[in-house]
Amino acid sequence: MTLIYENMPKKAMGLTNLAKVENMLSNRSHKPVANQFKITLQNGTEVFQSYNSIIAVKVNGQTFLDRTCWDYSNTTSRYRKFFLQEDTKTTKEKIKNGVYVVLDLN
């Protein structure tokens, strides 16, 4: 995803609250998990990042998944399921049916 001028916050809004970054929480301990992030941009776009890779983006009612990273590991899958609120089988069906767009996000 490329940040372009047109998508930058308006001058009146300033750069405060441009993005909120939160660690995902463990289902077991409910404590923050290292290297698993939910990023919420000022415009409402939500991004799931695992380590240094963008895994999924939800923007304007559309969901995008990274072609090579969306199902990379057990840990990535665990937190992707939480981010999307669905199991892997459902995600695969949505990809197959064109509900989710798979492309290179990294």
Image: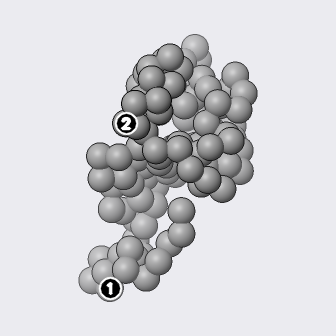
Mark on residue 11?
1
- Residue under the image location 41 percent in, 59 percent down: 41
Q: Is residue 94 above or below residue 64?
A: above
Give SS at disc 2.
Answer: loop
Q: Can residue 31 be seen in the rendering of this structure?
A: no
Residue 8: give x, y in percent of width and height: 40, 76
Residue 14: give x, y in percent of width and height: 36, 79
From the image, which quarter does the C terminus lie in? bottom right
Answer left or right for 95 relative to 104.
left
Q: Can residue 44 be seen in the rendering of this structure?
A: yes
Give the image quarter of residue 32. Answer: top right
Q: Which residue type does callout 1 highlight?
A: Lys
Residue 37: give x, y in percent of width and height: 58, 43
Residue on which the image places disc 2? 99
Q: CA distance from mark 1 to mark 2?
A: 35 Å
Q: Which residue type does callout 2 highlight?
A: Val
